[in-house]
Every structure is written in C-alpha cells, then in structure tokens.
Image (tube, helix red, strand yellow):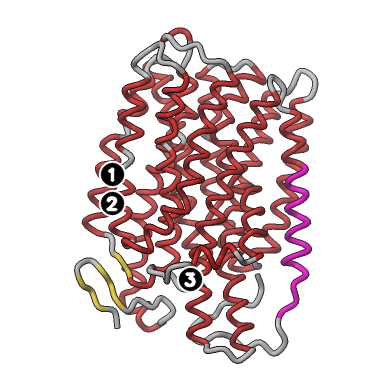
Amino acid sequence: MNKRSARWIKGWNPEDEKGWKQGNARIAHRNLALSVLSEHIGFSIWSMWSVLVLFLSPDIGFSFTAGEKFLLVAVPTLVGAVLRLPYSYAVTRFGGRNWTVFASLVLFVPAGLALYVVQHPGTPLWVFLLIGATAGTGGGNFASSMTNITSFFPQRHQGWALGLNAGGGNLGVAVVQLVGLLVIATAGDTHPSYVIAAYLPLIALAALLAAWRMDNVDAVRTEPGAQREAVGCADTWWISLLYIGTFGSFIGYGFAFGLVLQSQFGSTPLQAATFTFLGPLLGSLSRPVGGRLADRFGGAPVTFWNFLGMAAGTAALLVASAGGGSFGGFVAAFTVLFVLSGLGNGSTYKMIPAVFALRAEREVTAGRDASHALARARRLSGAVIAIAGAVGALGGVAVNLAFRAAGGSAAPALWSFLGYYAVCMLIVRKVYLRRPAPPEARPVPETRQSTHV
C-alpha cells in the first residue's frame, strides 16, 4: 500500500500488478509526462549552441573560425557528460520531484548568460567557452530524469518508458534547431537572442509544473555506494561502450551537423538550419521504437543489427562525401544515421535492466534471497544508467573533436566512426549474444522479465 507524505510516496512497488491497475500506473505516467517536459527543455538548452554558432558571423561582429565553433559546441557536451553522474546521484538523495524543480530552474543560468553574450560583439572566445560550459546543466538533466523514471515503472514496461522519456528529451535537440530555423527564416541570421528568449518562459513553466504535479518516491532512493559498486561490474563498461556508439553519435551529430554542412558544402545558415532539425527529430522519435523492439526481441539482437545499419549508413556518407560530394545523398545518409542512433539508444538502455534482472535470477538460482536480489538489480540498474549516460555523452565530444580535426573534409572522421561501430558489433556478439542462459533458472517473484538480454 502506497502512503503519501509531504510529496513523498512511501512503499512504492511498481511490480505490484494489483496496485499498478488501481492507480500506480496513472501516477507513473503523470510523472513520466512532466519528466519528459523538463528533460526536453534541458536538451534544448544543452544543444542551443549548435544553433547559436550558425548566427555567429562577421555580420554581427563575431569572427570565429570553423574549428573554434566546433570547440564551442563540444564544451557543453563535455560538461553535460560530467554532470550526469552527480545529477543521477542527486535524484536518489533529494527525490525526483525536488531535483526536477531544481534542475529546471538552474537552466536560467546558461540561458541568461547566452542571451547577454550574443548581444556583445567582440567578446573573446574564452568567455563564450565558459558560458557554453554552463549549458552542460541541460545535459545532466537526462541522467536524473532517467534514474527517476526507472523507479516508477515495472520491468515489463521499462523499455517503452525509458525510450519515451529519453526520446521526448532528445526531441529538444530538434526543436531548438527548428526555433533557430524559424528565427532565421523570419528575422534573418543576425538575431541569435530571439532563439534564447523563446525558452525563458518554458523553463519557468517546467519548474512550476514539476513542483505542482510531480512526486518523490522512496523507491528511487538507493544505499550509498551504488555507483561505486556498479563501477566494478564489467557489464557497466560494456554497455557504456555501446552507448558511446549510439547516444554519442546522436548527440555528437546533432551538435555538429549544421557546422559540417557549412564546412563540407559551404551552406548558408538558412540552408544548414533547414536540414539540421530533421535528423534529431526522427532520431528522437525512433528511440521509444527501439525500446519497444528490445522489449519484444531482446536488447542485444536489436542493438547488434542496429550497429550493422549504422555502419552501412556511415559507408553511404563516405560515398556521398567523395569527390565533389552529393549534398542530397549526404543529408539523406546522415538522416538515416540519426534514426538508427535513436533506435540503438532505446535498445541499449533496455539492455541495462534486462542484464541485471538476469543476474538477479542467477543469484536466486544459487540460493540467494529473491527480494534482496531484485532490490540489488534495481539499485545497480539505476547506477549503470547514470554511468552509461555520462560515458555515452563523452562520445558526443569525440564526434565534434573528430570533425574539428578532420578540417574541411569529413572523411577521416567518418572512417573512425565506421571502425567504432564495427567494434560495438563485436562486443554485442561476443559478450551478450553468446551469453548462455542459466540452467534451470527460475524467475524472480513479482517480475515477468525474460532471461533474454
């Protein structure tokens, strides 16, 4: 029986099917919807510099090189990755509702500073880098949101719930680029402040709704040392490497796509903004689909075939960029890569609770207490979600630095991505697709989780 006290719900058990049907599902979905809103705005603020750099031209007093712009969009990615671990930990100490309110309100800092600096021509690059770093708070939002939502939903729905939560957040990358396109198309490419100003009331709205309608649940609280325990688990690092390939690609391409079109094909800000939103949009929408597919077929098989598709898409990009280059082919192949990265994000994240549920089954088979094994699996799943999210976001930094190092041609960077996708396929095949199911394993009580990863 759940007990509600001072915005805390005590005794929360999403695996209780009777309670789920009698009202817990409604509570979980309400918190999911508001979590998506907050995370969505966080992603928009995190990725806003991928749009603002398209405005920073000599026409309004800024003379940054292409390499300096790639560096500027890499800095928020790096800070966002680093903040994911403390953000995930914070939600287990302060509660999902409380931390979501704070995480929303703190977005006023990067938005306000960016609004100021883009209206002051001649500001040196180092100031832009420091202000861009504060936008990393939007990236940290993802980890706390995912850790929180994991505690609300039963195992059988987590692929869909995590995919929807992350996909709705990832949409923030596409939406901020659509806002940039709207500003350029209507007011021209000399008003970057309009992009930022559009988000100030939305930040306030997200914080108010979270304070009014979200809940803290005691299930999200973990014993101290969960992340430390997860660090010593090999699965944490295998899955993190896979997430570099999926989420690192998504966020890295989302931040860099417009600049790549400018450096590779000489696109104008309007031309770049016209196409940059499409890939992140489709990639965000495909993430819950990846979670659904993983719920049905298993995370490892879906992830393996997804990396094969990403490798093929990268090969198509290399063909499209050869010689004089095909702008249409390049955009089309990049869009396919975005879709596949979204699918892979969903399937890879679904692997986390599935892997640890399987470990719990093995512990029960070996004679360990079932409730203790299941609680440990949930605790480690939440910790691994945070670690994999942080490491995966570092892949976005690598993508931007690879494009920066490649200079005017994207080919060297694309070859490195192709090699990494091949490594990820090998990891999935060797570590997860060939992992034998435990003999005579019996399911943990109160969960219907399949033994397939």
Residue 15, label in figure: none
Residue at which label 1 appears? 105
Examine the rendered structure and indicate whether residue 301 appears above or below residue 87.
below
**Kind of residue at disc 3:** Arg
Magenta span covers which residues? 419-437
- Give the Cα separation between the discs numbered 3 and 1: 28 Å
> How many marks can you see?
3
- Give the Cα separation between the discs numbered 2 and 3: 23 Å
Examine the rendered structure and indicate whether residue 363 appears above or below residue 9.
below
- Quadrant in the picture for the N terminus: bottom left
Judge depth for marks 2 and 3 and give the one in front. Answer: 3
Q: Position of residue 168 (x, y in %)?
A: 44, 50
**Kind of residue at disc 1:** Leu
**Kind of residue at disc 2:** Val
Residue at (63% x, 38% y) in the render: 398
As for residue 90 lying within the magenta part, the answer is no
Main secondary structure along the magenta-highlighted residues: helix
Residue 379, label in figure: 3
